[in-house]
Amino acid sequence: MSKLSREAYLVFALQLIPCALMPVAGWAQATAPTANAASSPEQAQRTPAGKFIQDLGNNALGVIKDKSLTQTQRSEKYDNLLRSAFDLKTIGHFVVGRAWDAATPEQRQEYMQLFEKLVVKTYGDRMKFYSGESFRVTSVRSESEKDFMVSSEIVHLGGQQPTRVDWRVRQDNGKLAIIDVIVDGVSQSVTQRQEYASIIERDNGKLDKLLTDMRQRLQGQGTQPENSNPQ
């Protein structure tokens, strides 16, 4: 997949990332379809999890393509869509791993604020890469009583091979939220966790250097890895 196609996908993915309630190995591991699987696109799009993701993709495209919106209005609508679709709190805890337990209350508060801002900023910046792709949910399978894997594809212009995107969706107290996105078989949440872990490890398990790095990224001074979802 070309860099542009990958960036275009990220518009749909919105981002970016993961969950402290599940071990990393188990989270990244694919599971076999169960009796509750919806294998056809039509069936999948009628399930709660499938409809949730299909509506998300449709709404994201609607915001991106609406020429009547100012850039500020478009960013606000997109940000709200992102915040409502992803379990950012769960994801944020997951990507810092055990460093969360060692952090002070003040560090935890600042980290979550920076984390959410970085998620919004990154996907807002990537909106400009949209070039007419279409999006559809293709199947849904249950992984547990609460978790579902929703498969989808991004259909590119020019006859390129569609990009497969899998969304891990959790239903908790009747509310659906995304806890991971898997692109070409790679978990974006686990990737982000690994990136953050390398910074935390250099700081002896503390959050200080990570917080500094996150502040710099928001100010446009930091360098972010190509495949990261700043979450």
Image (cartoon, rainbow, N blue to C red):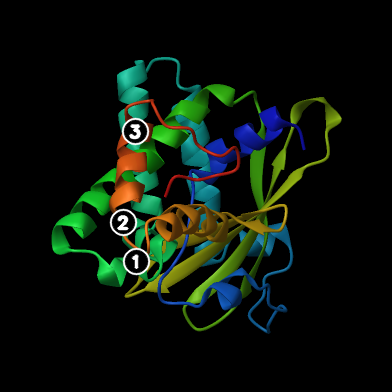
Q: Is residue 152 above or below residue 80?
A: below
Q: In this rendering, would 99 be left or right of 146?
A: left
Q: CA distance from mark 1 to mark 2?
A: 7 Å
Q: CA distance from mark 2 to mark 3?
A: 14 Å
Q: Is residue 177 above or below residue 210?
A: below
- Whichever of labels 1 and 3 marks the residue nearer the N terminus, that label is 1
Q: In this rendering, would 143 be left or right of 59?
A: right
Picture coordinates of residue 11 (x, y %)?
54, 36
**SS for tag 1?**
helix
Q: Quadrant of residue 154?
A: top right
Q: Which residue is mark 3?
A: 216
Q: Is residue 46 above or below residue 98?
A: above
Q: Which residue is mark 2?
A: 207
Which quadrant, please, contains the N terminus? top right
Q: Which residue is mark 1?
A: 99
- Whichever of labels 2 and 3 marks the residue nearer the N terminus, that label is 2
Kindly identify the residue that appears in the image at 67 percent across and 31 percent down.
Answer: 133
Amino acid type at image mark 1: Ala
Amino acid type at image mark 3: Gln
Viewer-closest of 63 and 32? 32
Kindly identify the residue that appears in the image at 44 percent across and 60 percent down.
Answer: 201
Q: CA distance from mark 1 to mark 3?
A: 20 Å
Q: Is residue 47 visible to the viewer in this orientation of the structure?
A: yes
Neighbour tally class for label 2: few under 14, some 14-19, many 20 plus, Cα within 10 Å: many
Amino acid type at image mark 2: Leu
Instruction: Say whether marks 1 and 3 touch (CB < 8 Å).
Output: no
